[in-house]
Amino acid sequence: MRQTFTIGLILIATILQAQNWRLGFMGWLDDQHYLERRADEKDAKKIVLLKVNAKTGSTSPYEANSPRKEVQKKIPKEFQLSWRAPHTKDFKQVILTKDNNLYLFEKATGEVRQLTKHEDLEENPTFSPNNAYIAFTRKGNLYTLHLESGKETPLTTDGSDKVYNGWASWVYYEEILGRSSYYKAFWWSPDSKQIAYLRFDDSPVPVFPIYRSTGVHGELETMHYPKVGDPNPLVALGICNITTNKTVWVDTDKNIDQYIAWPFWTKDSKQLLFQKMPRDQNKIELLLANPQNGSTKRIYEESRPTWVDFFKDIYMLEDNSGFILRSYQNDWYNLYYYDLNGKLKTTITDVPWRINSIKKVDEAKQIVYFEGTGTINTDMHLFSVNLDGSNLKQLTKGKGEHIAMLSPQQSYFVDRYSSISKAPSRVLYDINGKEIRTIVQSQTPEFDPTLHHKMELFRVPSTDGKFDLPVVWTLPSNFDKKKKYPVVFRIYGGPDAGGIKDAWRGWNGNNLTDMGIIVVSVAHRGSGKFGKKGLDYMHRNLGKWEMEDYFAVVNWLKKQPFVDTNRMGITGSSYGGYLSALALTYGADYFTHGIANLSVMDWQLYDNVYTERYMDTYQQNEKGYQQGSVLSHVDKYKGKLLITHGLMDDNVHVQNSIQLIDKMQDAGKEFEMMFYPNERHGWGGPKGKHARKLKESFWKRAFFEE
């Protein structure tokens, strides 16, 4: 009866909190006005939408006309407007897809016009900056289509099942361009007259088989997947003039095993800035390419004894005076201003803490706005600094996470602020950091130990004393220091993964704390919280220092009288699954139970770009590979491990879990496993529900029934 009552109160509190989240700042309409949701003065259950004058606070009713919703209402029923549907900024034109073909929706007329008629799917349709064309890929070739005339033009013709123009090879998609690219590997010039694109040839790359068990005979799927030491795809950078349809190939040495990626056009479209690094990934070069003849000029170079990363957020200045680089030159991400000849104009910032991103550059006023942690590495703040490096200011105040939403011309910003013990608020400030008004203030619920799961942020020193590791734990409701509680580490733990923030998550806990388990998260030295000096510990040592830092936290926990040292669990997926399996083998003296999901078990079995970045090749670092392999430590295993994996995982192949299972069986070790047929690297639906129940059952049996 008490439990039902408690759940009811928590549910009511959750509903009220959700109602509160519906209120408040909804976005900027222009530099002087923002949109706000408020409860109607006459009927508190009714929500009204208001246009608010930032300076005076005066309001007027606002009719929300979402362009996307307008389009959705007008398009014929046989079309679906997906969230990825390409559109002009004003939504006057939208690209729709049906039966593998592209259609153009004109908002003004409500008409839908078919653009392509082909049996093969068109991928990543993208408007040119002037909205006159779209570009897309089809079956390994790159095309443009003139929207007014409907004329389709192939820019390449050699595409095949191994050659892709403007479409990324898998390892580039996964590790270099990123999943958000959706394999897109072409970039319009600002003047809409040229397209830069990458051409991939997967001929040298080994093929990996993936088995689909559906049907009587099953089906074999193959993919070009380069593992450690394997040949890479051959890559070339081309620039196509869409008037002549001729490609100029950028001058890069095709005989060198290197990576080429992340081009940025200069604002006048006369030059293309691109990046290359050798396979060792310990040096990066920025080069300017001439679209007329493909010649290049190197303007920047950076190297480290460990590894470097591609610059994915270079800011090209509108006046063509140069670019802003966010680089680890001084072991922390800082901002540097270079001209297009590679001359350093200004070290914009030189701070011993992490700068996360550039929010906005006001070129007229020569001011850069950026987000960074400040001196507390679990915080987040908005800063401003002059382009010449002077007048660095922190604009948000107070410990915790501040997410700033700048007005279009940077006259104001709204600060979405919270901390681990303070519910979120939204406060309006002028650009100098002067508070104007509180838009919404969520009331932090009074903590009730009989109802709530308390979350706390604290720090534990690493064993070598060099780092104070951020730790967050969530304590069960009715927490009693006189009792003994099991612990579960929830981790990901990959290089530069971050993970610990001083931000509100509420008192409502999770499925593990509901069972009476203390849940712990840790940011180890290689999490990015400690800059490049912390990250560099991971070089040639994946697994080692993550484990050492987790061991330090385990040792600290064991000193707490309410922690049951015989029930020390850990769980994670992908890299977190790797560390969970490693914790039950290499770390068997510290961890007793674990769930390893879709995990790398031996780094020789993962892709070469990611693995060699940190580990070098197996031939260069045999000791590191052996030390970091879960397979090497099976003899130490003595706890209870559940292994789960999707049988069609095309990222971390199920081969990883199968090889561990093989070793465990031969060593006579007891464990549990669950494979999910036809599932990839993570899954939802019925099998996702099955996996959640399976894991809950594992912890209940392991901690409370045995």
Image (cartoon, grey):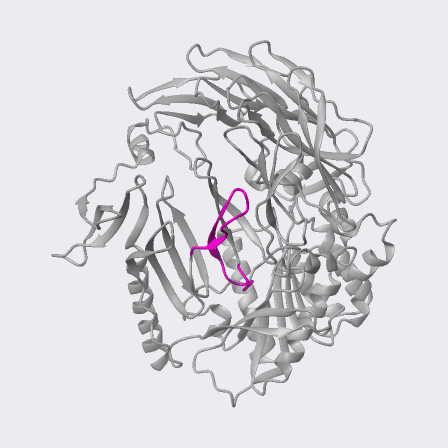
Q: Quadrant of the N terminus?
A: bottom left
Return the residue nearer the eye: 426 or 99: 426
Residue at image x 25%, y 40%? Answer: 64
The one nearer the camera, 332 or 701, is 332
- Is 393 displayed left or right of 32 in the figure? right
Q: Residue at x 57, y 18 (%)?
A: 194
Give the x, y percent position of residue 657.
71, 56
Residue 552: horizontal and vertical position, in percent?
68, 74
The percent coordinates of residue 328 (x first, y second) are 66, 49
At x 58% / y 21%, what residue is drawn?
195
Q: State left or right for residue 316 relative to residue 305.
A: left
The verdict on residue 81 being magenta is: no
Q: Is residue 129 left or right of residue 305?
A: left
Residue 86 screen position, x and y as percent = 44, 29
Observer-nearest of 163 and 364: 364
Judged left or right of residue 531, residue 282 is: right
> Magenta-highlighted stretch: main secondary structure?
loop
Residue 326 vertical position relative to residue 94 in the rendered view, above or below:
below
Residue most extreme to the bottom: 482
Say whether residue 388 is magenta: yes
Judge whether residue 516 can be spotted in this image. yes
Number of labels in the image equals: 0
Asked whether the viewer can see residue 224, the reply is no
Q: Nearer the viewer, residue 262 or 636?
A: 262
User: If the image is split into quadrants, where does the C terminus sit?
Assistant: bottom right
Q: Where does the magenta region start and end?
A: 374-395
Q: What residue is shown at x 63% (from left), y 57% (from top)?
A: 528
